[in-house]
Image: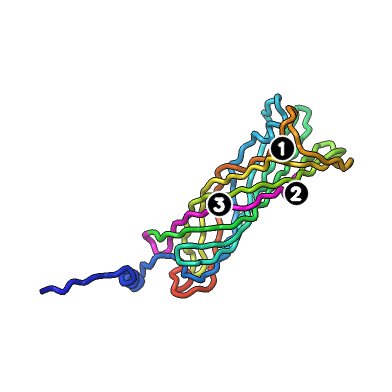
Amino acid sequence: MLNRLTLTAPAVLGLLVLAGTAPALPPMGAFSIDLGGSYSAVSTKDIEDFYAPLTLDNHAGSAFGFQGGVAYNVSPSFQVGAGVDLISKQYKVTWSNGDVDTWKMPALGILGRLRWLMPMNSPDLLFAISLAAGKYTLSGSSLTYTDPTFSYDFAGSTFGGVLAIDSEYRLASSVAVDVSAGYRLATIKTITFTEHPTGASDTVLLRDGTKASFDYSGLVIGLSLRFYFGGDGSSVTSQ
């Protein structure tokens, strides 16, 4: 009679390790730091609303940013942590006479993070789904004109977050590169201004009397480096 051989999940994982194809999951107890940049496909409508009923045909915007954070592996498959999401949103509106209105609307998000890690078919590659949520606050936001007589500073905040998927590839024993794509939901719906040099302050309104808003929602793409520290038995942190 042939003996029946049963392979349990730990036994299969052990064979994969011996074969050099262990999944690239970090170990429980590992810490990581990630630093990188982002690009956000944010709407221009929030600025266009200030000029209604005029139609802007000569304006340009950008929303590059910085992302970074720290994380702790509560298990090989789950990370919890905190991070920052800085969106450097800016618009320039050029008038027919050459005058320029410069809108600088950077917002800084302080976010809690949860990340679910899944191994791929390579020992150096993993797939992840992440959720980040927290408070976004205007930071250094202003409106300036070609004529420097008047300018405005803005303040405001909101609750928002980012849902993303990402792919992490190990470059070295404790270093990985991460490419992510997701959607950010964050709109600051109440904004106050301070006028310079008068010092006047009030809520920002549109021409029709409704409250103005700054919108940071939209597709966000990120590229970052992740550095792992600590933990035992990981194919990411040891070889």
Q: Is 2 positioned to the left or the right of 91 in the image? A: left
Q: Which residues are magenta?
A: 121-141
Give amino acid for label 2. Gly
Kind of residue indicated by mark 1: Lys
Name the residue rendered at 73%, 41% in the picture.
Answer: 191
Residue closest to the eye, 85 or 134: 134
- Tag 3: amino acid: Gly
Asked if labels 2 and 1 touch by Cβ distance under 8 angstroms, the answer is no
Residue 239: name its quadrant: bottom left
Q: Quadrant of the N terminus?
A: bottom left
Mark whose residue sits in front, 1 or 2: 2
* Residue at the spot 75% in from the left edge and 39% down from the top edge: 102
Q: Which residue is mark 2?
A: 140
Mark 2–mark 3 Cα distance, whole angstroms, equals 23 Å
> Is 134 one of the magenta-colored residues?
yes
| Mark closest to the chain's N terminus, 1 or 3 | 1
Tell me where residue 165 appears, x and y as whole percent: 48, 52
Does the residue at mark 2 contact the one at mark 3 (Cβ under 8 Å)?
Answer: no
Residue marked by disc 1: 92
Residue 234 image label: none
Q: Residues within 10 Å of mark 1 (few under 14, many from 20)?
A: some
Secondary structure mostly taken by the magenta-highlighted segment of the chain: strand
Distance of mark 1 from mark 3, alpha carbons?
24 Å
Q: Can you give x and y, in whole percent of width and height, for residue 51 in the image?
A: 72, 29
In terms of depth relative to the viewer, which is nearer, 101 or 68?
A: 68
> Is 229 situated left or right of 126 in this image?
right
Q: Secondary structure at mark 1?
A: strand
